């Protein structure tokens, strides 16, 4: 009975050895095979980068300022006579045209005043007819020595007084008609009307002209900016003397200098306008020159009160540009990574200029045929090899 367990252990060990033996042989054969072919390290290929040559084109240089959109016209509508507000004939925010009736006051009192003044005119005119006849007859009798001279003079004076009363009555009639016309408050300009500040049924115009609403005309729209003295002198130097017969801000007689405006949330200066006023002097307190620009604003994109950026073109010069994202920075300044003719990476220190969209003007440090790394800059190391491809090659291979 004791021999049986030992016999089992020997059989179990033998079975394990029989199972492991083929695996060991296979591993040996694989290892031997690798050794026979040679275990050589293969380095990874150079990283792929996208390169582009600098772009040469004319670049317009601008000066840019911030400003606030202003309405071209703003009018307060006020009650010019006292009365109860009877009717409001517009919707707040509505666009109105010159002459549209917007508010109506109770007219009855003013219509009665007109009728009374008209009756007074008629009465004085009728009296004048009689006084003129009396004066004429008295003069005829006095000239024939058939009546006293004093009577002719008295009746002539009475006639002249009646004439004055007729003129006075007519003036009062005109005043009454004018007051009646003020019962209708009309739009003096085209524009958009604000919300009414007084509701129907209220007494307005008592003691002071009550403000009823405001009309704002924003087509065209203005944007005023304050240009600093340094830019004023710079523009004068680069643009040159003003042509004869022109005003400040004009490039030719009757032709104003162009400009563009962009809203605060829009990087594109796509709204065209022009200068229409330049202040005659620089403000000594701020050292700035006031300039007003105007925009057609037919779609009313420019809402009065909005902050905007206004730019003025100064000059256009041939320039070399590269993608701004391809220009890196360190403590020494800006630099670009360039691939030389051996496909090795070099560092080029550059002097940069203005930003033109996504491109940056490079004043020095690059040649037109340099291959500048524009994508994959983080993969490139100075002195290392890379696989340069142009954007078009990358698109084809991708």
Image (cartoon, rainbow, N blue to C red):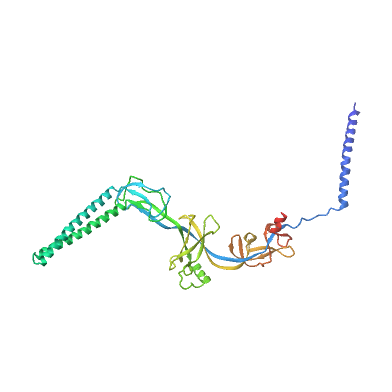
Q: Percent x, y for residue 362?
A: 62, 66
Determine whether, in the image, residue 287 is placed left or right of residue 371.
Answer: left
Q: Is residue 144 above or below residue 11?
A: below
Residue plotted at (58% across, 62% down): 355
Q: Can the viewer see residue 290?
A: no
Comparing 338 with 82, the one in front is 82
Q: Residue furthest top?
A: 1
Res 339 quadrant in image: bottom right
Q: Percent x, y for residue 342?
A: 75, 64
Comparing 67 with 13, the one in front is 67
Number of on-image labels: 0
Comparing 382 with 342, the one in front is 342
Comparing 349 with 216, the one in front is 216
Residue plotted at (29% across, 53% down): 179
Residue plotted at (28% across, 47% down): 108
Which of the image's four quarters has the N terminus?
Answer: top right
Residue plotted at (19% across, 56% down): 126
Q: Is residue 228 above or below residue 192?
A: below
Q: Percent x, y for residue 371?
A: 69, 63
Which of the image's four quarters has the C terminus?
Answer: bottom right
Res 43 quadrant in image: bottom right
Q: Can the viewer see residue 173?
A: yes
Q: Percent x, y for residue 92?
A: 41, 48
Q: Is residue 80 above or below residue 316?
A: above
Determine whether, in the image, residue 317 is placed left or right of residue 81.
Answer: right
């Amino acid at each position: 009975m004791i021999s049986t367990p030992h016999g089992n252990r020997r059989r179990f060990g033998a079975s394990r050895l029989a199972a492991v033996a083929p695996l060991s042989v296979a591993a040996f054969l694989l290892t031997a095979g690798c050794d026979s072919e040679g275990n050589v390290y293969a380095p990874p290929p150079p990283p792929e980068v996208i390169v582009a040559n600098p772009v040469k084109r004319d670049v317009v240089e601008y000066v840019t300022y911030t400003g606030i959109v202003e309405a071209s016209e703003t009018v307060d509508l006020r009650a010019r006579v006292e009365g109860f507000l009877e009717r409001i004939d517009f919707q707040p925010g509505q666009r109105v045209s010159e002459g549209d009736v917007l508010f109506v006051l109770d007219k009855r009192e003013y219509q009665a005043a007109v009728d009374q003044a008209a009756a007074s005119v008629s009465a004085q005119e009728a009296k004048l007819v009689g006084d003129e006849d009396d004066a004429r007859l008295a003069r005829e009798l006095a000239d024939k020595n058939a009546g006293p001279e004093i009577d002719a003079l008295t009746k002539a004076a009475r006639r002249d007084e009646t004439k004055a009363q007729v003129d006075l009555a007519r003036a009062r009639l005109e005043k009454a008609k004018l007051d009646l016309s003020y019962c209708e408050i009309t739009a003096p300009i085209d524009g958009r009307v604000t919300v009414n500040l007084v509701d129907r049924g209220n007494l307005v115009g008592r003691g002071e002209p009550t403000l009823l609403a405001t009309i704002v005309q924003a087509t065209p729209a203005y944007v005023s900016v304050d240009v600093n003295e340094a830019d004023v002198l710079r523009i004068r130097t680069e643009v040159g003397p003003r042509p004869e017969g022109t005003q400040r801000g004009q490039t030719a007689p009757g032709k104003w200098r162009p400009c563009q405006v962009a809203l605060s949330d829009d990087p594109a200066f796509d709204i065209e306008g022009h200068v229409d006023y330049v202040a005659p002097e620089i403000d000594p307190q701020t050292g700035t020159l006031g300039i007003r620009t105007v925009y057609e604003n037919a779609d009313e994109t420019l809402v009065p009160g909005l902050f905007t950026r206004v730019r003025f073109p100064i000059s256009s010069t041939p320039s070399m540009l590269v993608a701004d994202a391809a220009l890196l920075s360190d403590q020494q300044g800006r630099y670009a990574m360039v691939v030389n003719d051996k496909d090795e990476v070099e560092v080029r220190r550059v002097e940069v200029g203005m930003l033109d969209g996504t491109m940056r003007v490079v004043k020095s440090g690059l040649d037109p045929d340099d291959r500048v790394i524009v994508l994959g800059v983080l993969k490139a190391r100075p002195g290392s090899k890379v696989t340069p491809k142009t954007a078009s090659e990358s698109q084809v291979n991708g």
